[in-house]
């Protein structure tokens, strides 16, 4: 296994961290979202799963109404770093 050289620029390391963050969000968070409620259902914190189920039922049609846009989430620097990791050529 070869590690990145120590003289790699900071912006490149931040770009790589943004890609790792993206992978974590799309690979690990769904697993947590499945396993954690199952685990909590068998503990004394079962009521948290019940509250979440009630919220899920109440909020089920939000995507069809246009969701709830969060500008602070859309403007996070991690998205620009992620896009910079994958350079593309201009035509």
Image: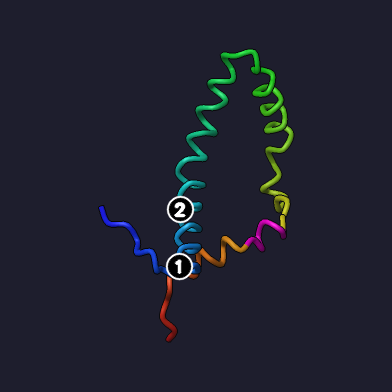
Q: Quadrant of residue 90?
A: bottom left
Residue at (51, 47) in percent of width and height = 25
Q: Is residue 73 magenta?
A: yes
- Secondary-structure class at tag 2: helix
Residue range corresponding to the magenta coloring: 71-76
Q: Nearer the viewer, mark 2 or mark 1?
A: 1
Residue at (50, 62) in percent of width and height = 14
Percent x, y of residue 36 = 55, 27
Percent x, y of residue 89 = 41, 81
- Secondary-structure class at tag 1: helix
Front residue of 16/71: it is 16
Percent x, y of residue 58 = 74, 33
Tag 1: Cα neighbours inside 10 Å, few (<14), some, or many (≥20)?
A: few
Which residue corresponds to mark 1? 12
Task: Look at the picture and state if 20 lies above or below 37.
Answer: below
Q: Is residue 67 magenta?
A: no
Q: Left or right of 81: which side holds 74?
A: right
Task: Look at the picture and state if 38 lies above or below 16.
Answer: above
Residue lying furthest front in this view?
6
Mark positioned earlier in the residue sequence (2 or 1): 1
Q: Which mark is residue 36?
A: none
Which quadrant, please, contains the C terminus? Answer: bottom left
Which residue corresponds to mark 2? 20
Q: Quadrant of residue 7?
A: bottom left
Q: Give the distance between the C-alpha atoms of the residues marked 2 and 1, in whole angstroms.
A: 13 Å
Tag 2: Cα neighbours inside 10 Å, few (<14), some, or many (≥20)?
A: few
Percent x, y of residue 26 = 48, 47
Residue at (51, 30) in percent of width and height = 34
Q: Left or right of 27: which side holds 36?
A: right
Q: What's the coloring here?
A: rainbow
């Amino acid at each position: 296994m070869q590690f990145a050289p120590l003289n790699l620029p900071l912006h490149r390391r931040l770009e790589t961290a943004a890609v790792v963050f993206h992978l974590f969000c799309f690979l690990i968070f769904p697993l947590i979202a499945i396993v954690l409620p199952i685990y909590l259902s068998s503990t004394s914190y079962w009521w948290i799963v019940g509250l979440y189920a009630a919220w899920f039922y109440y909020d089920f049609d939000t995507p069809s109404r246009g969701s709830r846009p969060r500008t602070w989430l859309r403007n996070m620097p991690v998205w620009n770093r992620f896009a910079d990791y994958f350079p593309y050529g201009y035509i």
